[in-house]
Image (tube, helix red, strand yellow):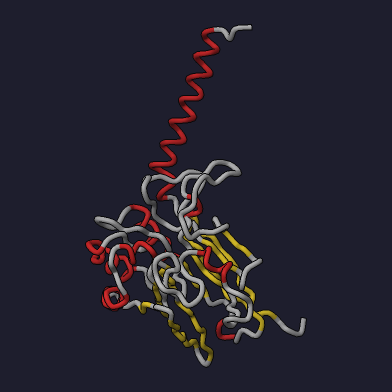
Amino acid sequence: MPIPLSRRRFLVGTAGAIAAAALGDGFLIEPVSIDVTRHDVPIPGLPHELDGFRVACITDVHLHRGIHRAARATLEQLARERPHLVALTGDICNRRIDLEDLVAFAGQARGTVATVATLGNWEHDAGIDRATGEKAYGIAGVELLYNSTARIRVGNASLTVVGIDDPVVGTPDVAAHAPGYVDTIQPGVVPRPAAVLSGHTHGGQVRLPFFTPYTPYGSGRFVAGWYRDTLAPLYVSRGIGTVVLPARLFCPPELPIFTLRTVDQRA
């Protein structure tokens, strides 16, 4: 039975409205709707001074020609959260000409105790080498970790943070900005960390329900969230910015915050 013209117009109009709403959300609303996610990281034997220590992971900001709306919204959330440690885990800017913006952003994205950073594949592609990165982050008061560690002291306790170079175009020793490399590390090769924090995938950036059409090279099987069948529990953040298409769909930008928790080994 033919669909009456009025009903056909209604269906076409409804489909058009849905498409327009999705486009409006994907380009205007979702890219700046920062999702603050919270995660407990249980660590056997964690000193009591570090129980409740909070770590914010900021990744894939993709600053280019200024500090964009999503980056500004991230800084606002960070000011509210006041984490102890902020880790800037790569792809913070896109080009060498954006280093001034990286310095400005990193200078505001500070932890109350410490702030560290690593390089991502976009920084490497832009010709931002270790010396350049150290100089820029140093101006902002941030320590760049390049296959190196930082020891953060809280009272009589210390937390060791390992920052690894990007595995896509850098020279990592172990896992880094792109999560796919984690699957290549054999157990026992390195000491097992409490957790591995990564980005790179953007969570797919533009997703469909139950389907992620694309993740960048180096993502491996990982998209977003926790993976517990790896060297150590791995968390892949959806990141902050966008590339190629200035849109996100069913994949809002993310500011994950991890709280270290003591595990009673007698339990």
Q: Is residue 56 above or below residue 15?
A: below
Count of numbered marks: 0
Quarter holding residue 132: bottom left
Q: Nearer the viewer, residue 264 or 66?
A: 66
Q: Is residue 222 above or below residue 103?
A: above
- Res 212 seen here: yes
Quarter holding residue 146: bottom left
- Res 79 seen here: no
The residue located at (49%, 55%) in the rendering is: 35
Farthest-out residue, bottom: 156
Give the x, y percent position of residue 136.
27, 73
Quarter holding residue 220: bottom right
Give the x, y percent position of residue 204.
49, 50
**Left of 26 or right of it: where is 52?**
right
**Which quarter of the figure is the C terminus placed in?**
bottom right
Farthest-out residue, right: 267
The residue located at (48%, 56%) in the rendering is: 201
Give the x, y percent position of residue 98.
25, 62
The residue located at (52%, 44%) in the rendering is: 213
Q: Nearer the viewer, residue 142 or 203?
A: 203
Q: Nearer the viewer, residue 241 or 53?
A: 241
Q: Is residue 224 above or below residue 134?
A: above
Q: Nearer the viewer, residue 199 or 147?
A: 147
Give the x, y percent position of residue 215.
49, 52
**Which quarter of the figure is the N terminus placed in?**
top right
**Left of 87 or right of it: where is 139?**
left
Q: Is residue 251 above or below residue 176?
A: above
